[in-house]
Image: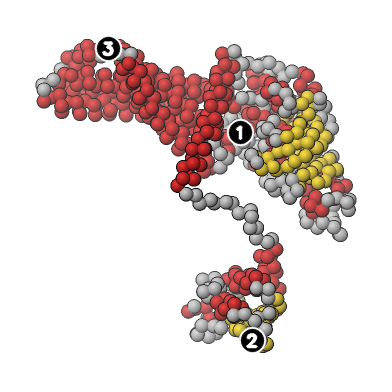
């Protein structure tokens, strides 16, 4: 029914993204202001922050689900919020998103969930689409679960199925909103491994909102810390280095060291 | 009180003992058993004497001891926290000699200071203010609805261009849901309505010996308007509520966001097939309801009023010009559009909680029924002006 994802847009999302002077919030309330950062291609970038610091809202703005109060988001050279809706839709099509709850379409089976995106955005025929969808499910370790409905599988499997759906069109950038929240330690570890694996093999860029320390230390190349009190980015860098650095801003340090703040600190090896 | 002192002493225990070792200091000894339900730790209970001593003035220091404490639970904690709070407010220093766990729990209760300004505001407003607020809220509500209508129109435009993100299987399953699956309940309600019309009419018409006009009463009543209204009301409960609940739950579960993030227009995918299915099915259901209503009237006329079946059917055809059927179909189609749009609109704009989805569903049904009645009035005026 639709035209192919245009190759130019996919190339755009392969060139990373940058956020300049972004301000997000609801109505008169500002959740985060003057957010600046750059995500390089094939980087795993984490947005950290305590509850209520606006990190999920920031992600929604970058993903294109919510308009910013000020500032710009650039995909490659393309000004995301400065352009028209057509441009945004093209870029959104070339990115993948995993929502906090998985947000699988509950009236469809797992394979249909993945296939829907392919049906809508490509001219592939039905059997190719099904094969492609099954492959994406197999990549996340859900081979054989294609005909299950989202309500019939566990929370961890739903997260992985959500990731398979996000991978449907081989996006250049993947947005993950709290991927390991609510998962048991083993599932959470498996998801981290999967993210690293996908970065290695597909060369995808990841922007992840998280507050699971273990997973942050394991996977993140770079991060920003949003401070809930000052509503700004107060620290940035590679999490494991930030945790060792005495000059890291105190709230960020407390976040990364589970409140220890200074003195004796245990930092898991990256 | 009775069994709180098992085997130790039958009289009420002295849980709190106060002494004044010096004029500016107060010594409080806590003892005995503290169990929730047996003891009242607040101002009306054990804390009362201590508070009146503090409020009496002159106390600068309090020493707390708990040597004779036997058993305790959160009731003692309430006592201590309230005491510590009162002491802090009056600038009294408290020296504690308490069991370790107890002291830590008291500290934990004070660890995070109570926030004063973060309380959710519950504004009590007068009549004028609340009327004003409601009127002011009307503007944004209308603009949200207009945005929805705009998105829906764009979606229809894309459908005509063949570029809409609509799946035919969604359309057909919606057709089944609001068409075939609704037949039993439409049969029941419409046939009963035909029966009722015939009964009510026969009482009056028999007095003039004009029983045969029951045929015209039932057929014109059903075909011109009542068949469509039966369909509209039943569909707003069946289909409108289902649409609102489904899209509302999808909104709450971020499924609508997931569609947008995947570059799929949610209105194309969720709203368009359902509104189209309802619009296509409403006239057919209206026609079906008309027939069932006429059958209902026929049953009453033939079995209870003793009219000749052939005569009745003949009168029905004679007395009902075809324009009534067409007007009924217009009513039915308009009602179908109202029900489907109202359901989808409230579902798509639902909040993200279980309560919000429930509210969206209720509002969808209420608005579609109000919409049906308003539309009936408007179409009836137009029809009478045009002499249809």
Q: Residue furthest bottom?
A: B21
Q: Label 2: state its secondary structure.
A: strand
Q: In the rendered view, would you say B147 is above or below A251?
A: above
Depth check, mark 1 against mark 3: the one in front is 3
Residue A151 seen in the figure: no
Quadrant placement of the N terminus of chain A? top right
Q: Position of residue B8 (x, y in %)?
A: 55, 84
- Secondary structure state at the residue bearing disc 1: helix
For label 3, the SS is loop
Q: Is residue B78 left or right of residue A229?
A: left
Q: What is the CA distance from the residue labelled 2 to the residue labelled 3?
A: 102 Å
Q: Give the residue drawn at x 44%, y 25%.
A: B338
Q: Which residue is mark 1?
A: B255
Q: Which residue is mark 2?
A: B20
Q: Which residue is mark 3?
A: B321
Determine the residue positioned at 62% across, 39% down.
Answer: A153
Name the N-terminal-most of marks 2 and 1. Answer: 2
Question: Which chain is disc 3 placed on?
Answer: B
Between residues B271 and A52, which one lies in front from this camera angle? A52
Is mark 2 in CB contact (under 8 Å) with mark 1?
Answer: no
Chain letter of mark 2 equals B
In the picture as drawn, the residue positioned furthest to the front comes out as B128
Quick check: B13 above or below B144? below
Q: Kindly report which numbered mark, 2 or 3, lies closer to the viewer in this rendering.
A: 2
Q: Position of residue B209 (x, y in %)?
A: 10, 21
Residue A159 appears in which quarter of the rendering? top right
């Amino acid at each position: 029914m639709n035209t192919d994802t245009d190759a130019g847009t996919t190339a755009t999302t392969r060139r990373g993204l940058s956020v300049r002077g972004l301000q997000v919030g609801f109505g008169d309330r500002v959740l985060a202001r003057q957010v600046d950062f750059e995500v390089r291609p094939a980087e795993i970038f984490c947005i950290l922050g305590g509850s209520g610091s606006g990190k999920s809202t920031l992600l929604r703005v970058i993903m294109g689900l919510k308009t910013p109060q000020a500032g710009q988001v650039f995909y490659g050279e393309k000004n995301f919020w400065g352009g028209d809706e057509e441009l945004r839709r093209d870029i959104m099509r070339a990115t993948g998103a995993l929502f906090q709850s998985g947000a699988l379409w509950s009236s469809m089976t797992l394979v249909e969930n993945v296939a829907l995106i392919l049906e809508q955005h490509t001219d592939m025929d039905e059997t190719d689409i099904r094969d492609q969808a099954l492959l994406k499910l197999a990549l996340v370790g859900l081979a054989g679960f294609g005909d299950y409905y989202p309500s019939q599988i566990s929370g961890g499997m739903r997260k992985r199925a959500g990731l398979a759906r996000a991978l449907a069109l081989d996006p250049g950038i993947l947005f993950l909103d709290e991927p390991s929240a609510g998962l048991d330690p083993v599932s959470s570890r498996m998801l981290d491994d999967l993210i690293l694996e996908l970065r290695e093999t597909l060369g995808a860029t990841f922007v992840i909102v998280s507050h699971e320390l273990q997973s942050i230390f394991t996977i993140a190349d770079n991060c920003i810390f949003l401070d809930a009190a000052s509503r700004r980015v107060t620290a940035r860098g590679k999490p494991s280095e930030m945790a060792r650095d005495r000059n890291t801003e105190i709230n960020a340090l407390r976040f990364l060291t589970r409140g220890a703040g200074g003195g004796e600190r245990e930092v898991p090896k990256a | 009180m009775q069994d709180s002192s098992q085997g130790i002493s039958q009289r009420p225990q002295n849980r709190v003992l106060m002494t004044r070792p010096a004029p500016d200091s107060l010594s409080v000894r806590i003892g005995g058993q503290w169990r929730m339900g047996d003891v009242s730790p607040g101002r009306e209970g054990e804390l009362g004497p201590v508070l009146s001593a503090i409020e009496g003035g002159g106390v600068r220091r309090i020493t707390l001891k708990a040597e004779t404490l036997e058993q305790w639970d959160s009731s003692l904690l309430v006592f201590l926290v309230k005491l510590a709070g009162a002491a802090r407010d009056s600038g009294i220093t408290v020296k504690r000699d308490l069991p370790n766990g107890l002291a830590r729990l008291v500290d934990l209760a004070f660890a995070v200071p109570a926030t004063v300004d973060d309380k959710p505001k519950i504004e009590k407003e007068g009549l004028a203010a609340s009327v004003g607020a409601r009127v002011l809220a009307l503007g944004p509500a209308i603009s949200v609805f207009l945005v929805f209508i705009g998105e829906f129109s764009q979606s229809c435009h894309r459908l005509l261009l063949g570029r809409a993100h609509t799946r035919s299987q969604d359309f057909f399953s919606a057709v089944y849901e609001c068409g075939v699956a609704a037949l039993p309940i439409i049969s029941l309600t419409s046939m009963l309505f035909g029966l009722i019309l015939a009964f009510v009419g026969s009482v009056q018409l028999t007095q003039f010996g004009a029983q045969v006009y029951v045929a015209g009463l039932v057929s014109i009543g059903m075909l011109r308007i009542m068949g469509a209204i039966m369909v509209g009301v039943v569909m707003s409960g069946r289909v409108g509520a289902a649409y609102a609940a489904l899209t509302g739950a999808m909104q709450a579960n971020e499924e609508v966001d997931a569609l947008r993030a995947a570059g799929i227009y949610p209105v194309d995918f969720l709203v368009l097939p359902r509104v189209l299915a309802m619009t296509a099915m409403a006239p057919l259901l209206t026609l079906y309801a008309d027939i069932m209503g006429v059958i209902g009237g026929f049953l009453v006329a033939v079995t209870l009023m003793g009219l000749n079946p052939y005569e009745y059917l003949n009168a029905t055809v004679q007395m009902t010009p075809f324009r009534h059927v067409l007007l009924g179909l217009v009513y039915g189609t308009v009602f179908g559009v109202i029900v489907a749009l109202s359901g989808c609109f409230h579902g798509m704009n639902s909040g993200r909680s279980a309560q919000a989805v429930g509210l969206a569903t209720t509002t969808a049904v209420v608005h579609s029924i109000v919409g049906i009645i308003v539309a009936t009035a408007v179409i009836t005026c137009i029809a009478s002006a045009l002499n249809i």
